Image (tube, helix red, strand yellow):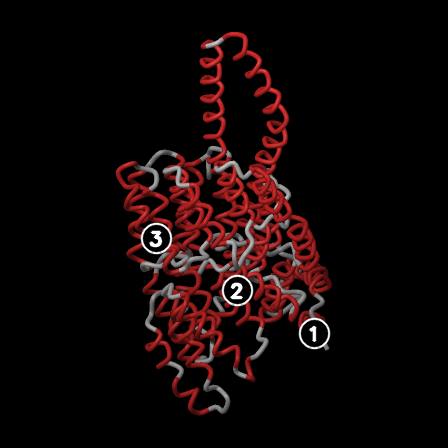
């Protein structure tokens, strides 16, 4: 057996560091004595050496190794070069390399890489062509199916490309429903997507499938049903303790609920699994963001994007951190990129609209909210988003009220709609109506913000003891909720001095007649001014 064959055996065995050392030495020997190895042997050594560099993540050296030696343009070598270029984030060079391979010589993995690169570059027609070619060669390539659906190819057309394989292989009858479900996902029809995946998940052969549970969790999240989303993420985690996909959304939901200790534990667990994925960095960033450490959240979001530029949750995290740091224009860029990657996710549009409102660009916010309403349909979420913008202008207050009433008719427990309706009722000083609205919303759920706002409304009608109870419940749900803490502290601080002030006022009035009335009027005005501060809402 020749030394080159020994190198080949080690490469096949995955001993890449050993291959690198030996092939490097042999190539040096070949350089000093060109007749030591045949051209074929030298070519093999170069390929094995480049492959060992690739496995050591020295992508640029791997490319240089191939280019400097002017290796013949074998298809597998070109594919490896394209892989190196993608790792170096030089997508144009990767596309150029793969485009140079004649269509008839492209293997499924080459077409799949091209499809993903075209999609990322916004070349949708070329991407669709490449995905279809993958399916022609491998009709059960499910990720290629998802790629086509994400590019607005009709579900029926995609299903037609798999019909023969479904009919010829037993136990594949579920695939048609699977394609239908994800067609709904990519058209933003969350309700029908949820129903279809639930039907799939209930089938005995697909019960407890982690991917389906993760998809359900994500769909519930998109639909604004955070409770069921968390439940499904927890089920998926129990089935797969090493699950990474979707954990960034799960961490975000936990952080929003104020469960920062759980978020911290989740981040540590994910880092122990892998620090080369975006998810653990996003989860850690959510912990920092909801701890009001925006600079750190910004850094962690940037790190996540560096690892995966297609991570929507990382873009949203970084955008939110930039917005809260006053860097609104930079935040807008990140939210727009998130929208490009996930045009059916409402939270991407919400982030952008919040930036417009923060910079007082009401017109841009209104245009965007109307577009979302028309594109994603009239559901509780889009109605509430449009109402949120309408609340910013006095002339559109009535429209906001109508939109919120429609949203609450569809989903009486939708928290964002309840919060905005409460804000409107506060402006109108209809506190009893607000209390009834909030009690109804809290009948079947418990939410920190709703309990805190109910506390504010109870203060307005002088129900101080119950207001204190509501603030306590809010803080038990989220100990970091500053507004609930401020509300409670203000009540504790003002409770005893109020009695003392009233006694002093009585003494003054007895001794000074009308002058006491004037002082009483000033005190009452000050009390109303203080009371106004109780009802400011985000």
Which residue is located at x 41 percent, y 51 percent? 417
Label 2 Cα neighbours within 10 Å, binned few <14 / some 14-19 / many ≥20: many
Q: Residue 394, how many percent across, how many down?
A: 29, 36
Q: Check the image and report above or below for 450 versus 22.
A: above
The residue furthest left is: 395
Q: Give the mark toward the camera: 1 or 2.
A: 2
Tell me the distance, in whole angstroms, between the alpha carbons under discs 3 and 2: 27 Å
Helix, strand or loop status at disc 2: helix
In the rendered image, the vertical position of residue 201 relative to residue 326, given as above or below: below
For marks 3 and 1, the one nearer the N-term is 1
Could you tell whether 44 is left or right of 212 in the image?
right
Residue 19 lies, in percent from the top left, at: 70, 64
Q: Residues within 10 Å of mark 3 (few under 14, many from 20)?
A: many
In the displayed structure, would residue 374 be above or below residue 132?
Answer: above
Between the C-alphas of marks 1 and 2, the distance is: 45 Å
Residues marked 3 and 2 touching at CB (< 8 Å)? no
The answer for how far apart the CA atoms under marks 3 and 1 are is 71 Å
Residue that mark 1 sits on: 9
Q: Quadrant of the N terminus?
A: bottom right
Residue that badge 3 annotates: 405
Q: Which residue is mark 2?
A: 217
- Circle 1 SS class: helix
Side of 486 where 139 appears, left or right: left
User: Which residue shows up at 37% across the image and 79% down it?
Assistant: 159
Residue 22 position by quadrant = bottom right
Label 3 with label 1: CB-CB less than 8 Å: no
């Amino acid at each position: 057996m020749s030394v080159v064959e020994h190198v080949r055996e080690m490469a096949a065995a995955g001993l890449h560091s050993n291959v690198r050392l030996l092939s490097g030495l042999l190539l040096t020997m070949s350089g000093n004595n060109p007749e030591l190895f045949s051209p074929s042997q030298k070519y093999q050594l170069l390929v094995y050496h480049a492959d060992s560099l690739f496995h050591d993540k020295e992508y640029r050296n791997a490319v240089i190794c191939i280019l400097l030696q002017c290796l013949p343009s074998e298809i597998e070598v070109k594919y490896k070069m394209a892989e190196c270029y993608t790792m170096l984030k030089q997508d144009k060079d990767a596309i150029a390399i793969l485009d140079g391979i004649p269509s008839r010589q492209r293997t499924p993995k080459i077409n799949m890489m091209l499809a993903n690169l075209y999609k990322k570059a916004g070349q949708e027609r070329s991407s669709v062509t490449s995905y279809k070619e993958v399916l022609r060669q491998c009709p059960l390539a499910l990720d290629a199916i998802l790629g086509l659906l994400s590019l607005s190819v009709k579900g029926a057309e995609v299903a037609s490309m798999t019909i023969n394989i479904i009919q010829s292989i037993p136990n594949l009858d579920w695939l048609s429903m699977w394609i239908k479900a994800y067609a709904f996902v990519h058209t933003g029809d969350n309700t029908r997507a949820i129903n279809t995946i639930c039907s799939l998940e209930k089938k005995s052969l697909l019960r407890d499938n982690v991917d389906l549970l993760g998809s359900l969790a994500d769909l519930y999240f998109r639909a604004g049903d955070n409770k069921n989303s968390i439940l499904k993420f927890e089920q998926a985690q129990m089935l797969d303790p090493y699950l990474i996909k979707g954990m960034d959304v799960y961490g975000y939901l936990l952080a929003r609920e104020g469960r920062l200790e759980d978020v911290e534990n989740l981040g540590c667990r994910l880092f122990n699994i892998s620090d080369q994925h975006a998810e653990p960095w996003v989860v850690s960033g959510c912990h920092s963001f909801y701890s009001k450490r925006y600079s750190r959240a910004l850094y962690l979001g940037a790190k996540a994007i560096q690892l995966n530029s297609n991570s929507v949750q990382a873009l949203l995290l970084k955008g939110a951190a930039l917005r809260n740091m006053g860097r609104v224009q930079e935040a807008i860029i990140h939210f727009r990129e998130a929208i490009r990657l996930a045009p059916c996710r409402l939270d991407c549009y919400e982030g952008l609209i919040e930036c417009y409102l923060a910079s007082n660009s009401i017109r841009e916010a209104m245009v965007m909210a109307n577009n979302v309403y028309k594109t994603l349909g009239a559901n509780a979420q889009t109605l509430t988003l449009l109402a949120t913008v309408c609340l910013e202008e006095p002339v559109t207050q009535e429209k906001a009220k109508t939109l919120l009433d429609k949203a609450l008719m569809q989903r009486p427990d939708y928290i964002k709609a309840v919060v905005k309706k409460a804000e409107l009722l506060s402006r109108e000083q209809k506190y009893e109506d607000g209390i009834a609205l909030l009690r109804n919303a809290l009948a079947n759920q418990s939410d920190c913000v709703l309990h805190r706002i109910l506390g504010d409304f109870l203060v307005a009608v002088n129900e101080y003891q119950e207001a204190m109870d509501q603030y306590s419940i809010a803080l038990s749900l989220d100990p970091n909720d500053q507004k609930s803490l401020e509300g409670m502290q203000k009540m504790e601080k003002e409770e005893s001095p109020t009695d003392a002030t009233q006694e002093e006022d009585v003494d003054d009035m007895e001794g000074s007649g009308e002058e006491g009335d004037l002082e009483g009027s000033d005190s009452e005005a000050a009390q109303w001014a203080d009371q106004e501060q109780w009802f400011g809402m985000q």
